[in-house]
Amino acid sequence: MVVVSILAFMTAGLVVGILLWLVLFKRALFDPRIYVLYGMVHWLLVGQVGTLLGYQFYEVQPYFDEVTHAKAAIIILSAVAFFLMGYYFPRTRSAARQEGPNPSVYDVAAKRLALVTSLMGIIGLSALYFFQKNLSLIRELVFLPLLVTFLAPSAAVCASYVLLLRGKELKGIAGTGLKFALLMIVLLAIFLSNVTFVFPLFALLYWFFNRKKVRIKPGTIASQTRPHLHRILSWVLVVSLVSVISLISKIGIQKSIAQGELVDLEATRGELLHRLATLDLFNPESYGIVLHAIEMYADQENYLLGKSFLIVMPFLRFVWPDLRGFGRIMVLDVYGSSYETINVGWAIPPIGELIANFSYPSVPLFYFVIGLVCRYLYQRYRRSNSPVYLGFYSVVLPWLFMQQRGDFLNGTVFPAYIVLTVTLVFWLCRSKRMGRGRDSFA
């Protein structure tokens, strides 16, 4: 167990060291490495280190074989190493030459974007409220309710852009009313959504630090100044505070909406303290789920071979009723058929789902490809001042973070829907940058 602990602490130390270097010294707040690596800390490494130190979290079973811990430590370290290898993979000569500015000839029409965003927000928040009061309909209608409710964080991302960068262009009584509506969309999307609150919250930070980048005129170099350390620390404090408030909302406001009556204050306080004390904000049980995937699938060569990924095609449920996501499959593996009528599932980290589907080699391959993609996206971000691309990039980063939380459906497909929605809205609201004035309310 000593070797396992050394590997685990070495992985955690490597990741934390890289994160501190990127944030505090390079101050590259929007480097995608931060979001992938911090996602691994947030959902996996905290649980791994805590378990090896003797703490017991919400694991699927209390104890695992020492060999299983060793396998998990090796595969987690390899995931980090191959991700960094992919990110630093040697560039081609053609890619190395593309270091100049990438000026955009398009702007975004602020008035049009504000109106579209308001419509999205009204639809998304109304659906979110309705389905929180009628949770059973989500299962009956498959994905449709969740896709509609995901319009709320998408609208909040667009609203953050308008409020922070283009708010002065919304003038008069109509403009003031629209800005108030956009502000309410952002706040409600943060406090009424579960995990997706990270998208609008991150959008506020992202557009705050990218205000100068968006304003760059065509033909100029897309240079950036590093944000001051005190601003970074201020945002860390704000994000932490809002995260705790969102947790309070989750176990208080949202539960009250779902039940149709106010929840007991004492029960809410007790649940909040319990979740904070057990690091529920970090979801440390993910490590135990990876161990379970190793013992139940890899060790027994009982591979799913991509079966859990088929859940993204809802029409298959009509001809294949037993089709389930991996989080749901694991709940039934652990608790048996007694949970058949209880619609719950675990959030599975990518490492666990990849092992269960395609064995160990799929993990380093997956993270190597993610590293290549991250480097390409970051190079485009550094060169681009297009609002359309920057809007796309603003939701890709929290998507990378959420992907580490778990299961192919919730960690990949639903955030991808937000990315698609935001990018499409920015693209539809684009306007010529040269030769046309910006929209404004009279």
Image (cartoon, rainbow, N blue to C red):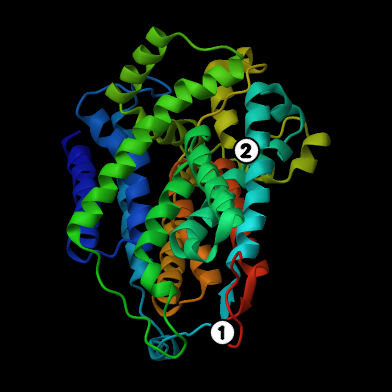
Residue 20 visible in image: no
From the viewer's side, name the closer residue of 96 and 208: 208
Q: Quadrant of the C terminus?
A: bottom right
Tell me if mark 2 has few (under 14), some (14-19) or many (20+) residues whose alpha carbon lies within 10 angstroms of its own.
Answer: many
Q: Which residue is mark 2?
A: 125
Instruction: Find the distance from the CA under tag 1 to the CA under tag 2.
Output: 34 Å
- 1 is higher (above) or lower (below) than 390: above
Q: Which residue is mark 1?
A: 105
Please tell me which residue is depicted at 37% across the width and 86% down the height of the picture.
221
In this image, 155 relative to 228: left or right? right
Three-letter code for the amino acid on which mark 2 is drawn: Leu
Q: Which picture quadrant has residue 113? A: bottom right
State the count of labels.
Answer: 2
Residue extending farthest to the right is 319
Q: Position of residue 183 (x, y in %)?
A: 50, 46
Q: Position of residue 112 (x, y in %)?
A: 65, 64
- 311 is higher (above) or lower (below) than 17: above
In this image, 17 relative to 100: left or right? left
From the viewer's side, name the closer residue of 235 and 110: 110
Tag 1 secondary structure: loop
Please tell me which residue is depicted at 40% across the width and 91% down the height of the picture.
97
Q: Position of residue 402 (x, y in %)?
A: 46, 46
In this image, 318 relative to 79: left or right? right
Tell me if mark 1 has few (under 14), some (14-19) or many (20+) residues whose alpha carbon lies within 10 angstroms of its own.
Answer: some
Three-letter code for the amino acid on which mark 1 is drawn: Val
Q: Position of residue 406 (x, y in %)?
A: 48, 41
Please tell me which residue is depicted at 20% across the width and 33% down the height of the picture.
1
